[in-house]
Image (cartoon, coloured by chain):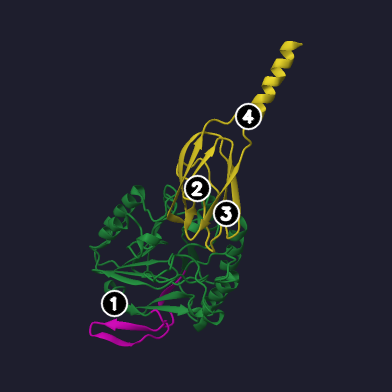
Amino acid sequence: MKRSDFVGHVAWTGAGILYVLGAEGIVRASADAAPGAFSFVQISDSHIGYTGPANDDVHGTLQKAVTAINAMPNQPAFVIHTGDVTHLSKAAEFDDARAILSTLRAPLLTIPGEHDVIGAEGPKRFASAFGRSDAKGRGWSSWDQNGIHFVTLINVGEGETMGVLGDEQLKWLQDDLAARKADTPIVVFGHVPLFAVAPEWGWTTTDGTKAIAMLRRFKAATVLNGHIHQVVEHTDGAIRFATARATAFPQAAPGTPGAKPGPMKVAPDSLLGVLGYRTVEVTGPATWRDRTLAQS
Amino acid sequence: MRTALFCAAALLALTAAAPSPKTYTVHIRDDKFQPPSVTVAAGDAVSFINDDDDAHTATADDGSWDSEGLNQGQKWSHTFAKSGKVTYHCTVHPFMHGTLVVQGEKK
């Protein structure tokens, strides 16, 4: 399989069991990354500062995720946190989150969620704690690594409205992607899903269709988001989307009768089974695994 | 002397006629501002109380005021001196909207 096909030939389940797809379909359950293989990890929605009944120890569950990642025998090339590191953008919340995340063995990248940019000080505190010197505009960036073109998009904080990329960022994305060949694997990170998961709950990016249109010419594009605290998969042509579990608390599935977005309380002994992180391994075909903290 | 007494009486009458500032309450509950529209007099205050388990803000669409993040049980109060109609929203739940109408001018 060519490298350009890596990212497009993957499948995973919400239960943390992963199967690798070859041209003939599911071929085997995946194993851990081979030594030296390229891999990265996605964590999301830690909500440091949340004190409600859905999780009375968000510090502890984030620490558990960090400990599990640090215990991986083959360390990922990087760990990306896809936003809502904090709950209210308070200075102490950023301090606490940074104290835990700074213990990661692998390099950390972080993009903001809407909970990280609350008020006039939120964006400044996020930039101070996790900002990248190579970022453009409100924090978007791209880089090439292991033959893959990575892009981080910012879809919170635009004019105080969540779920908007904005014209400036879209223009930058268009120029950034224009320089890439169609067979270059593209991996895009953002906080709010680019596709419409549940617009009535704010689980969409209103101008995300413009970014998706820019990705259509690529043979293998993958978009990884947080925000909704659960694994939801979606395919649009050659573009694959996947949202990630939180480390803080679960939220209801879209369409659940009588449900609304927000922290969802589950039985205490079930909590770790609905929190987690995602490992992405490239050993030939890319392998993707959503692990719960109960499995860690 | 008579003029002074007249002025004092007039001032007293004016003071008595001026209503005391009131404080209104908007509850943030079930991802809604309740009530969704409030009309107050200039000089009155509005308290926003978050009853939800989720974080919320009450943020003027024109940026003129912002509660910033409120956890469950937290309250933010603001006195409105300038008349006019302001729509507001929750920055972490963009589908949540409210309206505040301020009448008259603060004396």
Q: Residue at x 56, y 38 (%)?
A: B80
Where is residue B71 shown, x and y percent of the image? 57, 59
Given contact means CB atoms under 8 Å apart, are the residues at marks 3 and 1 in contact? no
- Residue B83 seen anywhere in this rendered image of the structure: yes
Disc 2 versus disc 3: nearer the observer: 3
Tell me which residue sits at (56%, 74%) in the image. A61
> Which dot marks residue A9?
1
The kind of residue tagged 1 is: His
Give me the disc on residue A249.
none
Viewer-side residue, A220 vs B93: B93
Tell me the residue that label 4 is attached to.
Answer: B17
Q: Quadrant of residue B61?
A: top left
* Residue occupied by mark 2: B59
Which region of the structure is painted magenta? Answer: A14-43
Q: Nearer the viewer, mark 4 or mark 3?
A: 4
Name the residue type under label 2.
Thr
Q: Secondary structure at mark 4?
A: helix
In magenta segment, residue A26: yes
Question: Do marks 4 and 3 share a chain?
Answer: yes
Single out the residue that lies furthest toward the right. B1
**Is the residue marked by circle 3 packed among few (<14), some (14-19), or many (20+) residues within 10 Å?**
many
The image shows residue A49 at horizontal and vertical percentages of 59, 63
Which type of secondary structure does the marked residue at label 1 adopt? loop
Mark 1 to mark 2 CA distance (whole Å): 44 Å
Residue that carries the numbered disc 3 in the rendered image: B49
Disc on the earlier residue, 2 or 3: 3
| Badge 3: chain ID | B
Q: Colour of chain A?
A: green
Of mark 4 and mark 3, the one earlier in the sequence is: 4
Instruction: Spot the yellow chain and give its letter.
Output: B
Q: Decide: is A294 above or below A90.
A: below
